[in-house]
Image (cartoon, helix red, strand yellow):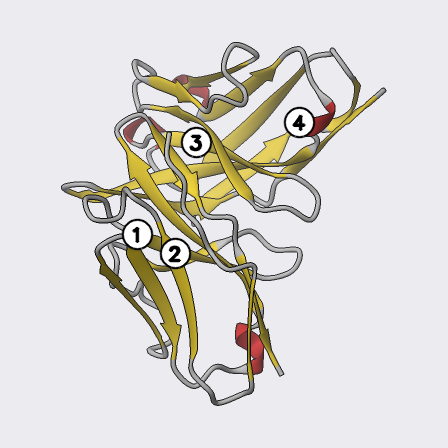
Amino acid sequence: EVQLVESGGGLVQRGGSLRLSCAASGFTFSSYNMNWVRQAPGKGLEWISFISSSGSSIYHADSVKGRFTITRDNAKNSLYLQMNSLRDEDTAVYYCTRDLYCGGDCYYFDYWGQGTLVTVSS
Amino acid sequence: SYELTQPPSVSVSPGQTARITCSGDVLPRKYAYWYQQKAGQAPVVVIHEDSKRPSGIPERFSGSSSGTMATLTISGAQVEDEADYYCYSTDSTGRVFGGGTKLTVL
């Protein structure tokens, strides 16, 4: 059974840093691209970061570029998100998602964790 | 970057057909996908590649795409279909979600 379990969320001061982790199990982690998606309280979904299976390709949304860094450790079946210079608008539930490549131009998130809440306060 | 636009809300009575639209300039050349998110839960994909339904998703869910608009149709909506629905698409360097549509079935 595929499982994605996020951890590391919590309360952090504005301008502070936090590192999220996602422990993956039930599939060959090193074969899949991975992403982080977030959802502010009462708001919609926002994709923020992508990392390829090997870690060689990384993309970030403009809203977090230069502040957040996605990494992975395939030996530990783990995905990470280093978040620096946190702002009030970064308050959200952060989901770890597996990227399914279904052929051609088809990519979507087929498995999601339950999310970890990050609260940025002054 | 690009945007996907959805209506904020759609309301139908049980048994009626619900249609949720998603518009975006990228849709003529990229697939649309649809996610369902019920309160307090992680999203679940209900349609991928414009019109394909994953196993386990009821047949009343269908999708279509033409030009700059994709549509999620729920034929004979049930009370349990009440949820937020998000369209989603991709490009070479990122992914984007629509703003979401709250479907009310009552």
> The disc labelled 4 sits on which kind of residue?
Asp
Which dot, 3 or 2, sits closer to the camera? 2
> The disc labelled 1 sits on which kind of residue?
Ala
Residue at position x 50%, y 60% from top? B7
Mark 1, residues whose alpha carbon is within 10 Å: few (<14), some, or many (≥20)? Answer: many
Which dot, 3 or 1, sits closer to the camera? 1
Q: Is residue B72 above or below residue A103?
A: below
Q: Is residue A102 above or below residue B12?
A: above
Most extreme residue toward the bottom, as rendered? B15
Q: Is residue A96 above or below residue B47?
A: above
Which dot, 2 or 4, sits closer to the camera? 2
Residue underneath mark 4: A90
| Residue B90 visible in the current orientation | yes
> The disc labelled 2 sits on which kind of residue?
Cys
Which dot, 4 or 3, sits closer to the camera? 4
Q: Is residue A53 above or below residue B103?
A: above
Residues under numbered marks 1 and 4 in contact, where contact means CB atoms less than 8 Å apart: no
Residues under numbered marks 3 and 2 in contact, where contact means CB atoms less than 8 Å apart: no
Residue at position x 31%, y 32% from top? A32
The answer to whether tags 4 and 3 share a subunit is yes
Residue at position x 28%, y 30% from top? A31
Residue underneath mark 1: B32
